[in-house]
Every structure is written in structure tokens, then in C-alpha cells.
């Protein structure tokens, strides 16, 4: 069994994800972790990938900040009545505005269309996202890995993972000199590798204590997959 990770697919079409998995030789005995942000920004907003994930026994989505923003707007999928419209407070409207400004409009449109034909599928997707973990720890190739969407804001080597807030795991922003645990490699996304210089554009970035697998798919770069067992990279 091999363990693969990718992140920040942001509306990548399912066919392209499947092509990437085929290129890497991903099989039924292997395991795939997607480190958040499957949704938003392009195409069908990642809805087809979410529906695929619901049926995969060997794949797991970790919660990303974009999925968290969608869940903060789950009131949009409740039955609309006169009373519920009046209850759309300024706070709810601000949540909706923030989400759409971050590329959520395409996902909301796709989920709205799906709700017309299969409302249970939308409920299944939302339930799946509500249960998505914030992090996972795995071992592969004799190494220990921490998988998380954005990193560890306010990091301390003595701070337990359970003590981090969701925001600290979902919204952390990497700096080139960020240092995490010794002896455990942190694998994450959220910060596009292009942020560290054009020489990193579209490429997985390796540092002594972390690996950034956000290659900027929403910017038009091909998606990437990392096999943890031997740290081999695959690009579509």
C-alpha cells in the first residue's frame, strides 16, 4: 500500500484527477488524502470530485478553509420561507458575501442545480464535509507525517494537535523560514508555492520540516500528487 497526497484542487474536473491518479499508478490497495480546498473558483466548483469522494473507500478529504466557508453558508440550502428570508441576518449575508468573493459562486451554483434533481446528494455532501477531519497522522516509507490543510499557526513543539483551533489549522500562512516539528514532516497546502518565488511556480516545495503541495491549480497549473512512501512527485 502506498499513500498519496494532493491539495487545493479548487474545482479541478474529476476526469483530470482520475488521469493524475492513473499516471501515478494509484490502485485499490493505495490511499489518497486530499488536504482540503477541493471546491470553488472554476468549472463545477469541485462538486463532481466531492460526489466521487463519497463513494471511495480508500480516499479521505481533510477540511480546508474553503469547505469551512461553504459550511458556514449551509443556511442557503435550507427551505426558503418568508420567515427564513427575514432571518437572513447581516452576519449571514456577510458570510455569503465573503464566500462568493473567494470563488464560492460556482460551487453554490453547481450545488443548487444538483439540489433540483437530487436533494439528498447535496445533504450527503454537506454531511461528509461536516465530518471531515482537520488533520491526520500517517507513517509511510519509514517516516512520520502530519497532514493538515494550512499548517500550524502559533506553533509550539509542546502544543498538542488537539489544542489548535480550527482557524489555526485552516488559515495558517507559511513563510519561507517557518519551522515545525522535528522528526515529523508536516504536509500541507493553502499557500501556493508560487508565493515563495517564481522558481517554485507549479511545483511541490520541500523544506526541512514541511512540504507544500499547493501548486496553484486555480492559477492554471497542472495538479500534482506526492507519494509519501518515496516522496516521488507526479504532475498531470
Image (spheres, rainbow, N blue to C red):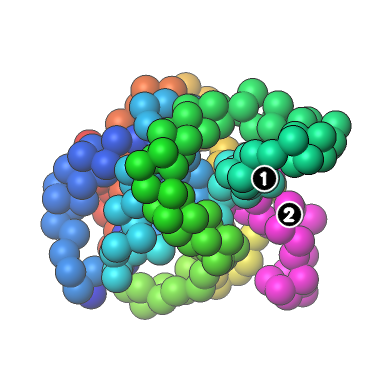
Tell which of 143 and 134 is nearer to you.
134
Disc 1 secondary structure class: helix
Which stretch did the figure color magenta? 148-171
Checking the image for residue 168, the label placed there is 2
64 versus 145 height, above or below: above
Examine the residues drawn in magenta and state their main secondary structure. Answer: loop
Residue shown at the point (30%, 31%) measured from the top left: 222
Residue shown at the point (52%, 61%) measured from the top left: 127
Is 49 on the left or on the right of 145, as rendered? left
Q: Position of residue 54 (x, y in %)?
A: 36, 60
User: Can you identify the residue that label 1 sits on?
Assistant: 75
- Residue furthest toward the front? 82
136 versus 61 height, above or below: below
Q: Quadrant of the N terminus?
A: bottom left
Q: Is residue 224 visible?
A: no
Is 155 on the left or on the right of 146, as rendered? right
Amino acid at each position: 500500500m502506498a499513500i498519496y497526497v494532493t491539495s487545493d484542487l479548487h474545482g479541478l474536473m474529476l476526469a483530470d484527477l482520475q488521469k493524475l491518479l492513473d499516471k501515478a499508478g494509484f490502485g485499490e490497495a493505495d490511499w489518497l488524502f486530499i488536504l482540503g480546498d477541493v471546491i470553488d473558483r472554476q468549472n463545477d466548483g469541485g462538486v463532481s470530485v466531492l460526489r466521487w469522494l463519497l463513494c471511495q473507500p480508500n480516499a479521505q478529504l481533510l477540511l480546508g478553509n474553503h469547505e469551512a466557508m461553504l459550511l458556514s453558508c449551509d443556511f442557503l440550502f435550507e427551505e426558503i420561507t418568508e420567515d427564513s428570508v427575514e432571518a437572513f441576518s447581516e452576519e449571514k449575508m456577510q458570510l455569503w458575501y465573503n464566500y462568493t468573493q473567494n470563488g464560492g459562486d460556482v460551487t453554490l451554483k453547481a450545488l443548487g442545480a444538483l439540489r433540483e434533481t437530487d436533494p439528498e446528494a447535496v445533504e450527503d455532501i454537506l454531511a461528509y464535509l461536516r465530518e471531515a477531519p482537520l488533520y491526520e497522522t500517517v507513517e509511510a516509507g519509514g517516516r512520520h507525517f502530519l497532514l493538515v490543510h494550512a499548517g500550524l499557526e502559533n506553533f509550539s513543539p509542546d502544543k498538542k494537535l488537539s489544542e489548535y483551533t480550527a482557524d489555526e489549522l485552516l488559515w495558517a500562512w507559511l513563510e519561507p523560514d517557518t519551522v515545525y516539528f522535528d522528526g515529523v514532516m508536516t504536509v500541507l497546502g493553502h499557500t501556493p508555492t508560487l508565493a515563495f518565488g517564481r522558481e517554485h511556480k507549479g511545483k511541490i516545495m520541500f523544506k526541512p520540516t514541511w512540504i507544500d503541495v499547493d501548486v496553484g491549480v486555480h492559477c492554471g497549473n497542472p495538479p500534482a500528487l506526492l507519494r509519501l512512501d518515496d516522496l516521488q512527485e507526479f504532475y498531470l
